Image (cartoon, rainbow, N blue to C red):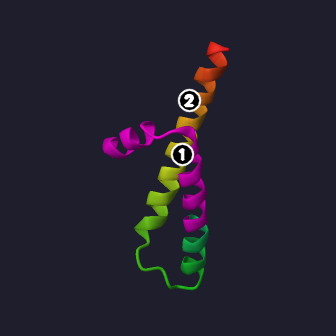
Amino acid sequence: MANAIEDLRTKTDDQLSAQLTELKREQFNLRFQAATNQLEKPSRIREVRRTIAQIKTLQNERAATAAAKA
């Protein structure tokens, strides 16, 4: 888990935004699969949701740091 967070911290803001967009698209597709009982790996929903939260937290931390410097 700590490895994934460190990988996210090394990414730029643009890379994080792109990954966030992709994860939200995947989350949308997973919700549809769950609704139609076609979901192969239910744990993936939780993984995606947590990764989205980690990216948003990191973005908020970076925004707060930038605001404090300005």
In magenta segment, residue 25: yes
Q: Is residue 33 above or below residue 24?
A: below
Q: Quadrant of residue 23?
A: bottom right
In what element is the residue under mark 1? helix
User: Which residue lies at the image location 58% right of the left edge and 85% below the top edge?
Assistant: 36
Q: Which residues are magenta?
A: 1-26
Residue 58, position as x, y percentages in the image? 53, 36
Q: Amino acid at mark 2?
A: Glu
- For marks 2 and 1, the one nearer the N-term is 1
Task: Tell whether 56 sits left or right of 8.
Answer: right
User: Which residue lies at the image location 61% right of the left edge and 56% below the top edge?
Assistant: 21
Q: Is residue 53 above or below residue 67?
A: below
Q: As rendered, which of 11 and 50 lies closer to the eye? A: 11
User: Which residue lies at the image location 52% right of the left edge and 56% below the top edge?
Assistant: 49
Dot 1, how many residues are within 10 Å of its Cα: few (below 14), some (14-19), or many (20+)?
some
Q: Which residue is mark 1?
A: 16
Foreground: disc 2 or disc 1: 1
In what element is the residue under mark 2? helix
Q: As rendered, which of 4 and 17 lies closer to the eye? A: 17
What mark, if any, has residue 66 been given in the picture?
A: none
Q: Which residue is mark 2?
A: 61
